[in-house]
């Protein structure tokens, strides 16, 4: 799926949260969205998902404004925060619900989830029988991320997916992201403070600062050190 931002201006009160004249994401690209706290990353993602509306400009997916059509939602997976979860369901119930929303039958959902079992909270975490709202922050995030990925979306949007995850889970998440890209050709926007992870898995980096795009370029062997130097200064 192709994403384009055109002349977007978003304000909260008198503060300009985002001012982006032009930005494009081509089909199959994986873009890492980086920036300091308050740079506008989450606002950026919420605008793409039509959860916020800009004061000016528009966001398009495959050439159609996200606010004028809901067709793109059927092939988009996303997880930004715990508000995407349904707290009164168990893990199994929630994932079956998500599968049903995307038109999967129970058997198909179970098969699709198999490759994510090692990433989901395990029995050793004592989560069997727990409701989603009773999970730790990290385990809740795992469930939300899997819900966004197992449906094999054409567009995947994740906000700070590596935060609150232990090292083994971070490694498994990277493997799952790369497998989804390889097997499904999924277009992705991944916002993260973890520069090492995003430069490792993303083919391109967009750097936001104070609501503006400062850098937007293909990932290279120098990208990580250049970003570290930028934030250190």
Image (cartoon, helix red, strand yellow):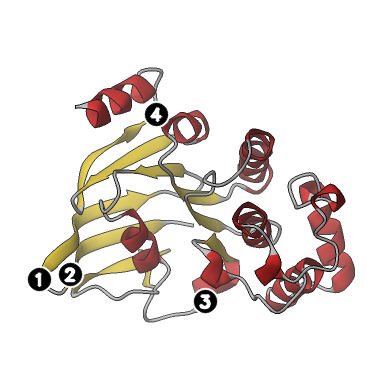
Residue 111, how many percent across, how many down?
86, 58
Position of the C terminus by quadrant: top left
Q: Nearer the viewer, residue 164 or 207?
A: 164
Identified at 39% across, 28% down, the residue is: 219
Tag 4 residue:
219
Q: Nearer the viewer, residue 148 or 8?
A: 148
Q: Which mark is drawn over residue 71?
A: 3
Residue 138, how many percent across, how many down?
62, 52
Q: Label 1 to label 4, Cα distance in Å?
A: 35 Å
Q: Label 1 to label 2, Cα distance in Å?
A: 6 Å
Q: Is residue 83 left or right of residue 68?
A: right
Identified at 80% across, 56% down, the residue is: 113
N-terminal of the two: label 2 or label 3? Answer: 2
Quarter of the image for residue 228 reads top left
N-terminal of the two: label 4 or label 3? Answer: 3
Element at label 2: strand
Element at label 4: loop
Q: Label 2 to label 4, Cα distance in Å?
A: 30 Å
Q: Which mark is drawn over residue 14?
A: 1
Q: Nearer the viewer, mark 1 or mark 3?
A: 1
- Alpha-carbon neighbours of circle 2 within 10 Å: few (<14), some, or many (≥20)? some
């Amino acid at each position: 799926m192709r994403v384009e931002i055109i002349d977007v201006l978003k304000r909260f009160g008198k503060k300009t949260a985002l001012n982006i004249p032009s930005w494009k994401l081509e089909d199959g690209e994986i873009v890492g969205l980086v920036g300091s706290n308050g740079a506008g990353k989450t606002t950026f993602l919420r605008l793409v998902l039509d959860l916020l509306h800009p004061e000016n400009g528009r966001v398009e997916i495959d050439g159609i404004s996200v606010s004028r059509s809901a067709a793109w939602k059927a092939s988009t997976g996303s997880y930004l925060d715990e508000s995407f979860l349904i707290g009164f369901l168990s893990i199994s119930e929630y994932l079956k619900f998500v599968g049903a929303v995307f038109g999967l039958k129970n058997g198909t959902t179970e098969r699709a989830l198999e490759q994510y079992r090692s990433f989901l909270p395990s029995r050793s975490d004592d989560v069997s029988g727990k409701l989603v709202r009773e999970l730790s922050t990290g385990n809740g995030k795992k469930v939300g991320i899997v819900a966004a990925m197992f449906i094999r979306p054409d567009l995947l949007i994740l906000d700070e997916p590596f935060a609150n995850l232990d090292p083994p889970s971070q490694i498994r998440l990277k493997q799952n992201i790369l497998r989804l890209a390889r097997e499904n050709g999924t277009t992705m926007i991944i916002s993260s403070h973890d520069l090492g992870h995003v430069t490792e898995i993303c083919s391109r980096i967009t750097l936001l600062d104070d609501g503006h795009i400062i850098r937007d370029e293909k990932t290279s062997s120098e990208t990580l050190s250049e970003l570290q130097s930028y934030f250190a200064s």
